[in-house]
Image (cartoon, rainbow, N blue to C red):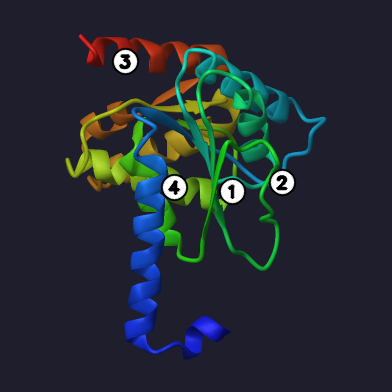
């Protein structure tokens, strides 16, 4: 509630400080992969184990892995990346529930503002992977898709893991959104849906190798 009473000028300074701190801390990363995923998956779930494998596959190649820094699939990916050549990064957000920083982070940042945090997700990413998740995961996914669609960022791979989980969303995009001409058919090519984290990792690695020439 303190933030709601804060004078506007001070709020702007706080936003500025989050931007500066994030940029200074993450500028050392180079090309990273941002992974989105839900906070509510437990350690004994298949999705959690997939997240651990994905984090390890990417970070073993020296690729920094960025997550939202919280529990569930964010923790899983950080856990897999932790101790590998690639840096394990968590961009934590202050929330009234769910969010608590997981312990598997080489770099851990804390944000009050969602839009600053989402800026950091994109700024250092050369690829995105979406694991199953809820509103937050969908928000981050569609922000990435919109930025690529509108050419505000360079085109990079956006890979969704789990055909069963994401299939209904794809069908809705085709049968309703595309049918009503709200997107173009080429917009469906902005992302890939795969069944395994190994496939996701391969797509990301091939893109990065091609980008390096």
Judged by depth in the image, the label closer to the viewer, 4 or 3, is: 3
User: How far across and down, in percent of the image, does residue 205 sit?
Assistant: 39, 13
Q: Residue at x 62, y 33 (%)?
A: 78
Q: CA distance from mark 4 to mark 3?
A: 21 Å
Q: Is residue 179 visible?
A: no
Q: Residue at x 60, y 18 (%)?
A: 56
Q: Quadrant of the N terminus?
A: bottom right
Q: Nearer the viewer, residue 19 or 123?
A: 19
User: How far across and down, in percent of the image, does residue 20 sit?
Assistant: 34, 57
Mark 2 secondary-structure assignment: loop
Query: For mark 3, what is the residue?
Result: 207
Mark 4 secondary-structure assignment: helix
Q: CA distance from mark 2 to mark 3?
A: 30 Å
Asked if marks 1 and 2 touch (Cβ < 8 Å), the reply is yes
> Within 10 angstroms of label 1, few (less than 14), some, or many (20 or more) residues?
few
Above/below status of 61 relative to 144: above
Query: For mark 4, what is the residue?
Result: 140
Mark 2 vs 3, N-terminal side: 2
> Within 10 angstroms of label 2, few (less than 14), some, or many (20 or more) residues?
some
Mark 4 vs 1, N-terminal side: 1
Residue furthest left in the image: 151
Q: Residue at x 35, y 10 (%)?
A: 206
Asked if marks 4 and 1 touch (Cβ < 8 Å), the reply is no
Q: CA distance from mark 1 to mark 3?
A: 27 Å
């Amino acid at each position: 509630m303190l933030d709601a009473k804060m004078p506007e000028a001070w709020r702007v300074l706080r936003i500025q400080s989050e931007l500066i701190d994030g940029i200074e801390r993450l500028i050392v990363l180079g090309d990273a992969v941002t992974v989105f995923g839900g906070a509510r998956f437990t350690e004994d779930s298949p999705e959690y184990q997939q997240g651990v494998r994905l984090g390890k596959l990417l970070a073993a190649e020296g690729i920094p892995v960025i997550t939202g820094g919280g529990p569930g699939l964010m923790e899983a990916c950080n856990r897999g990346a932790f101790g590998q050549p690639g840096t394990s990064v968590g961009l934590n957000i202050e929330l009234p529930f769910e969010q608590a920083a997981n312990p598997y982070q080489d770099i851990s940042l804390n944000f009050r503002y969602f839009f600053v945090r989402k800026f950091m997700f994109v700024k250092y990413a050369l690829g995105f992977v979406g694991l199953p998740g809820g509103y937050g995961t969908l928000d981050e996914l569609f922000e990435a898709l919109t930025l690529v669609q509108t050419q505000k960022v360079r085109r990079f791979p956006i890979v969704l893991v789990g055909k069963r989980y994401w299939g209904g969303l794809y069908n809705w995009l085709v049968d309703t959104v595309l049918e009503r001409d709200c997107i173009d058919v080429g917009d469906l090519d902005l992302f890939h849906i795969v069944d395994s984290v190994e496939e996701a990792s391969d797509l990301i690695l091939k893109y990065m190798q091609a980008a390096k020439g």
